[in-house]
Image (cartoon, rainbow, N blue to C red):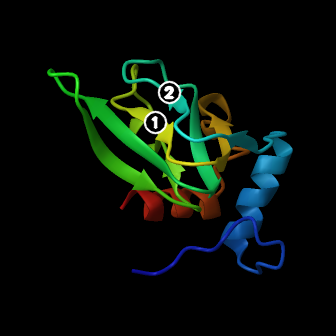
């Protein structure tokens, strides 16, 4: 599987990394630092953002009927947590930081605009969702 570019690398010459950095800057999206075991969203919430993981790890989980947690996805730097819930009324899983991490919360309202969704960013999202 091809490794996608690190968007935080200022020396990246790829059009994808440059397009994502530019779109984030245009939307004034600032990194958010999270401590260990911090819930970012809860199953059943209305989706507000997708989270581009800049560093650290986040996991998606669902609560089972007996109260146990089932981990569904692990998200590392460069991944987009919450991408699977784009366009839904309620999110299907919770998101939690594993340890200290930094995320870029991309508001759903920003993602749905033509200013944000350039062909390069659409390609990046499609590759990440595969």
Q: Nearer the viewer, residue 46 or 93?
A: 93
Q: Position of residue 32 (x, y in %)?
A: 73, 40
Residue 72: % across, % down: 29, 46
* Residue at the spot 77% in from the left edge and 67% down from the top edge: 18
The residue that appears at 78% across and 41% down in the rendered structure is: 29
Q: Identify whether 75 is placed above or below 87.
A: below
**Which quadrant does the C terminus fall into?**
bottom left
- Residue plotted at (83% across, 79% down): 11
Q: Quadrant of residue 6?
A: bottom right
When the figure is inspected, residue 93 is found, relative to residue 29, above or below; the finding is above
Badge 2, how many Cα within 10 Å: few under 14, some, many 20+? some
- Count of numbered labels shown in the rendering: 2
Looking at the image, residue 104 sits to the left or right of residue 130; the answer is right
**Residue 70 in the image, given as x and y percentages of width and height:** 25, 39
Judged left or right of residue 98, residue 112 is right
- The circle drawn on residue 50 is none
Percent x, y for residue 120?
A: 63, 64
Report which residue position mark 1 lands on.
95
Say which label, 2 or 1, has the lower sequence index: 2
| Residue 61 drawn above or below residue 77 | above
For residue 113, say whether it is visible: no
Q: Are marks 2 and 1 in contact (CB under 8 Å)?
A: yes
Is residue 103 depicted above or below 66 in this figure? below
Disc on res. 41: 2
What is the secondary structure assignment of the residue under circle 2? Answer: strand
The answer to whether residue 101 is visible is yes
Which residue: 55% across, 31% down? Answer: 40
């Amino acid at each position: 599987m091809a490794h996608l570019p690190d968007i935080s690398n200022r020396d990246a010459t790829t059009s994808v990394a440059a397009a994502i950095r530019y779109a984030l800057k245009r939307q004034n999206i600032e990194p958010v630092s999270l401590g260990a075991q911090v819930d970012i969203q809860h199953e059943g919430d209305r989706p507000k953002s997708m989270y581009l993981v800049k560093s650290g790890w986040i996991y998606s989980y669902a609560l089972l009927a007996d109260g146990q947690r089932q981990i569904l996805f692990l998200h590392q730097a460069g991944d987009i947590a919450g991408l699977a819930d784009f366009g839904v009324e309620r999110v299907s899983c919770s998101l939690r930081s594993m340890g200290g991490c930094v995320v870029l919360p991309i508001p759903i309202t920003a993602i749905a605009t033509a200013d944000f969704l350039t062909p390069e960013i659409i390609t990046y999202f499609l590759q990440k969702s595969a």
